[in-house]
Amino acid sequence: SAITSLPSGVGGGSLNLISTQTASSSSTIDFTSGIDSTYKEYIFKFYDIHPATDQTQFTFQGDTGTNTNYNQTITSTHFRTAHNESDSETAFGYNTQDDQAQGTAFQVLAHDGTVGNANDESLNGSLHIFNPSSSTFVKHFMGNTSANHAGDYQIESFMAGYFNTTTALTRFRFKFASGNIDSGVIKLYGVS
């Protein structure tokens, strides 16, 4: 017989929109509320994030309580794939310059020098934060972005890691390594 419904207790998590922020020549986009013990997973979604500066990195960091230093200790991995429009070059590899080993810098979401600022270039993707309110475990994250490089490349970046703190993370900041976020939308969801 055909399966017409899921058994009770089985199902995917629902995305619950918490907030939306729209960039307009913004130096940073900060999420300083709505991240608490309500959900075990939070997802940031990036839509057409466009830099003012050509070939820059899109980055993030978190912080605890009402702190605004955004310098939590991170250990992470980062790799990327690339393919150019002329079909003359492809790439796949680990990026040591984009990872951290107990570092406190902003974590790279899009490979070094990836995002172009031509009118038709932007970045899209997502970042998952797991159980940021835990007082027992470190805080894991993983992200995936798709961006247009100024050299007419499609570059997909994959990164994951953890914030090495058992203190609750309550806020996150997004920015480009240089220049403003010219335009774009970031949405924050809680997963129930």
Image (spheres, rainbow, N blue to C red):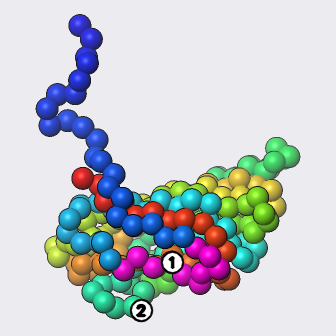
Q: Is residue 93 visible?
A: no
For the residues labelled 2 and 1, the Cα–Cα distance comes to 14 Å
Q: With 183 as the anchor, is 64 left or right in this view?
A: left
Find residue 172 and name its label: none
- What range is drawn magenta here? 23-32
Residue at 39%, 91% in the rendered image: 68
Q: Kindly give the residue lying farthest to the left in the view shown.
A: 8
Rendering coords of residue 56 (x, y %): 68, 74
- Magenta span contains residue 120: no
Point 81% across, 48% down: residue: 85
Q: Main secondary structure of the magenta part?
A: strand
Q: Which residue is mark 2?
A: 69
Taking the magenta stretch, the answer to whether it contains residue 25 is yes
The circle drawn on residue 29 is 1
Residue 44 percent across, percent down from the top left: 43, 63
Q: Residue at x 24, y 37 (%)?
A: 11
Please state which of the two labelled residues, at mark 2 or mark 1, is closer to the viewer.
1
- Indicate the position of residue 7 as horizontal and vertical percent values: 17, 28
In which image quadrant can residue 128 be found? bottom left
User: Considering the image in quadrants, where does the N terminus appear?
Assistant: top left
> Residue at 22% across / 27% down in the picture?
6
Which secondary structure, mark 1? strand
Q: Name the foreground residue: 4 vs 88.
A: 4
Quadrant in the picture for residue 139: bottom left
